[in-house]
Amino acid sequence: MVAELNLDFDYSKYGFRDEENYIYKAPKGLTEEVVRELSAMKNEPEWMLQRRLKALRIFLQKPVPLTGMWANADLANLDYDQIHYFVRAGEKPQHDWDAVPQEIKNTFERLGIPEAERKFLAGVGAQYESEVVYHSLREEWQKLGVIFLDTDTALHEQPELFKQYFGTIIPAADNKYAALNTAVWSGGSFVYVPAGVKVDIPLQAYFRINAENMGQFERTLIIIEEGAEAHYIEGCTAPVYSTNSLHSAVVEIVVKKGGKFRYTTIQNWANNIFNLVTKRAIAYEDAQMEWVDGNIGSRLTMKYPSVYLMGRGARGEVLSVAYAGRGQHQDAGAKMVHIAPDTTSRITNKSVSKDGGKTTYRGLAKVAPGAINSKINVNCDALILDEHSASDTIPYIEIEEEQTTLAHEATVGRIGEEQLFYLTSRGIPEADALSMIVLGFMEPFTRELPMEYALELNRLIQMEMEGSVG
Amino acid sequence: MAVLTNGSTSPLGTLGTLSVAQVLEHSQAANEPAWLTEMRGAAWSAFQQMEAPKWRRTRLDELHLETLQLAAHPHAPELLGADKAAEQGAIFVPLRDALTTHADLIGSKMGQGVPPLANRYSALRAALWQNGTFLYVPRNVELEAPLHIRYTLPAGEQAHFPYTLVIVEANARVSLIEEHISVESATATLTGATTELFIGAGAAIRYASIQQQNRTTYHIGGQVITLDRDASGEWVSFGLGGKVQHIEAEARMQGDGSRIEWHGATFATEQQNLVIVPWLRHIGTATESHLDFKTVVADQGYSVFDGMIKIEHDSHATSTRLEEHAIHLTPNSRSDSIPGLMIDTNDVAKAGHASTSGQVDEEQIFYMQARGINPADAKRLIVMGFFETALSAIPHEITREQVAAHIEGRI
C-alpha cells in the first residue's frame, strides 16, 4: 500500500502562476456594493445577504486588533482597499474532472490532486480563487447519506441544515476577520456525516490563490452526527506576487455525542499572504475533536484552532507545527475551553524559526466553573536555528474550578552542538544533519499525517532548510 | 501646601485637581534638587495624558484615582536595623532625609530600574512619592543582620507612594525585608510602591517583599532588581493582603554571570484579586535565573500570575526556568497563569517554563487521615508545605514565623 501511494509531487513548481482569465473579478476594495453583487451572482436567499451586510458593518466598525490575543503590529500593514474580494474563475463546480477548465485542471494536476483522489480519498474539493471548481464524493459514501459539497452549493441544496448551523459556532462579531469572512465568504466545504457512519478514508479540499491581490475567504461547515467519524484534510498554496494577499477562512465544526473528527491542515501559502483564520469546534458528550495543523507558508499566520468541550467526557486535541523562515511570522496556537465535567484536552506545539523568522505560540486553556475533573495537558517546544530568529510563547491559563488538573510545559532551545557533532562525525553533511534534527523534532506531528502528507511536509521542510548552513 | 514636605498643613485637594504647576511648586518649596522637580513634573504631566493601562485581569474599576487625597503629613517608614548598618558604614535612612545628604547618588539611579513613564501608575508614583527608604551599602561591606522596612498607610489617609532605592556596591552583602501594611478604612485606599535595587559586581542581596495590607487597600507596585556582573539575588515575593494587588516586578540580569533565585507565594481568599507580573530579563552573558511561584486561591479569590522570561538579542548562554503551581481550595476561586517566553536569540543554554493547577491531593489527605490527622488539619499542613520554599526564603526568622502564622490562620 505504501509503495503505491508514492505521489511524485514536483515541489519546485508550487510557485507557478496561471494566466489570469476570469469570468468575473470584483473591483478592489470592500463596499456594500461588492457584497450585494457577490450575493446576487450566487443567487443567495435574502437572509444570507442580510447576514453578509450585518457582518460587513461589524467588520468596518471593529478596529484592527492590535492588543490582546491578536496583538501583532504587522496587521496594520494589510491594505484592505487593495484586495479583490471576489473572483469567479469558472462556471459551477464540476463533478467530472474532464469538465474542469483546462488551465485550472493543469494547476491541480501539477499539485497531484486527481491522482491522490483516485488512490486514497473518499472525496475531493478543489477551490480556485473564490469558488470551488471541482467536487466529488465516492458513491459508496453518498449512499450512506454523507454530504460533501462546496459551501455555496450546500446553501442551495441543504438550506435547513445550513441555516441551523451557519454562524452559530463562530458569530460574525467574534473578531474582525470572522466578520470579514462572513461578509464576503465564498467557497469552502460543507460536510455532513449522518449518525453512526464512519468515513474511514479522508475527505480532502485543496485551496489555491492564483490572482494577484486576491482575497480568499472560504467558509467551511462540518457536522458530525452522533457516533459518526470522519477525517478532513486541507492543503493551501499560492504563487508569489510582489503585493500582499489575504486568506481569511472561517471553519465551524460540530461533533455530536460519541462522534470523532479530525481536521488536518497543511498550510503552504506564499510568503506574501496574510493568513488570518478562525477555526472552532464544539464537542458534545464523549465526542472527540482533533486539529492537526501544519503552518509552513504565509507572511503572517494568526490561527488558534479551538475546541469547546460542551458535553461530559468530551476530548479535544491540537497538534501543531510551525516553521518560520525569512520574513515570516507564524503566530499560531490553540484554545481549549472546558465547559462540561470530565473533559480532557491536550495541546502539543512544535515550532522552528530560522533566517530571521519568528514563531509565536499563543494559547488558551480555560476551565469554566462546573467543569469538574477537567484535565489539560499543554506542551510547547521551540527551536531557534540562528541568531537572527526569535520565538515567543504566550499561554493563557484560566482556571475557575477546583477539581482540575492542568499541566503546561514549554522549552526553547537551539540545536544541540552534540547532536550535530554526533551526526557529522558519522559522515553526514552538516546541512543534512540539521535537517534530520529538525524533522526529528517535528516527528510527533508528522507521524499523525497520512503517508503522502507526511512525505510532502518533510520535503517542504527539507527544501526550506536547504542552504541553511553557512 | 504640604504634598511633598512634612510640616505644612494646607489642604492639598485631590489627585483630580492637582496641576503640574502645583507639583513643581511643591517640589521647589521642599528644596528638592532640580532633576527631581523636573522628573516629577514630567511624570505628572504624563499621568494626566496617559490612558489607564489595559490590565484586563486586574479589577480597578472601583478605584477612583481622581477622588483620592494625598497625606498631608506623610510618615517616614519604620526602619529596623539602621543603627547596626550605620556601624558598618552603610546608610539606611528615610529617602527624604537622604535627599539632603546624597542627592547626587540618588539622582544617578532613580528611575533607572522602574521607568517613570512606563504606564499611568508608574507615572503617578514617580510624580507624587513623598517619602521612602534609601539604603546604601559600600563596597565589600557585609551586613549580617537583615534590615527591615515597614510601610504603613495609617488610619484616615487615602493614598501614599513609598519609594525604596537600594544601592549595593561591589562585593557587598545585605538582606532586606520590605513590608506593606495598612489599617481598615471606610473608603478605598491606595498604596503605590516603587522599589529599585541596584546590585553591584559580585555583590549579593536577599530581598523579601511582603504585601499584607487591609482588604480596603489597592496595592499597585513596581519593583526592579538590576544585577551587575556576577551579582546574585535571592528574592521572595509574598502577595497576601489588599483588596486588589497589581505588582510589576523584574529581575534584570544585566551583567555577565549574574543570577537570581526567585520564590513567590500568592494567597487570594474572600474577594481578593491579586496580580503579580514577574519578569526575568536576561541581557548579559551566562546569566541564570530560576523562578518558582506558588499560588493558593479560595472563596471568591482570584489570582493572576503573568510571568515572562525575556531573553534579549545580545545575551548569550542564558539558563532559565520559570515555574508556577496553583492550588484551588474551593470551587468558586479562580487562578489565571500566563507563563510567557520571549526569546530573541538562539544562543540559549536552557529556557523553559512549567505551570500546573489542581486541588489538594485527595490521596495525601487520605494518607494523613489514616495517621489520625483530621481532614482540616491535613489540608492546612499540605498548604503550608506548598508554601514552605517561599517561607524559608524570608531572611529573618521572626518575620518568617509571623507570615507563616498569618497564612495558617486564614486557611
Image (tube, coloured by chain):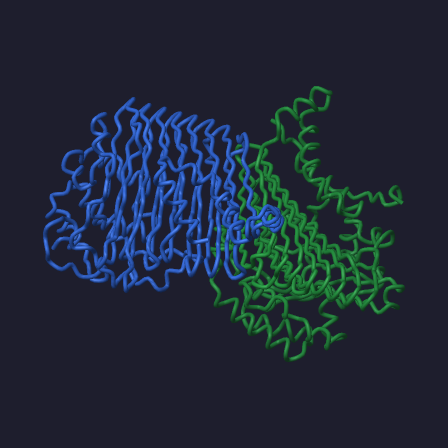
Chain colours: A green, B blue
- Residue A253: x, y in percent? 69, 63
What residue is shown at x 61% (from left), y 46% (from top)?
A: B367
Q: Closer to the camera, B99 or A194?
A: B99
- Residue B298: x, y in percent? 48, 57
Q: Closer to the camera, A135 or B155?
A: B155
Q: Quadrant of residue A82?
A: bottom right
Most distant residue in the bottom direction: A46
Give the left or right position of residue A190, taking residue B82 as reference. Answer: right
Q: Quadrant of residue B232?
A: top left
The answer to whether residue B178 is above or below residue A145 is above
- Residue A259: x, y in percent? 76, 62
Regarding residue A460, the answer to whether it shows in the image is yes
Regarding residue A219, the answer to whether it shows in the image is no
What residue is shown at x 13% (from left), y 53% (from top)?
A: B2
- Residue A317: x, y in percent? 68, 53
The answer to whether residue A128 is above or below residue A242 is below
Q: Quadrant of the N terminus of chain B?
A: bottom left
Give the left or right position of residue A137, taking residue B228 as reference. Answer: right
Give the left or right position of residue A96, taking residue B346 as reference. Answer: right
Q: Closer to the camera, B396 or B286?
A: B396
What residue is shown at x 23% (from left), y 37% (from top)?
A: B134
Most distant residue in the front direction: B372
Q: Quadrant of residue A43?
A: bottom right
The answer to whether residue A34 is above or below residue A315 is below
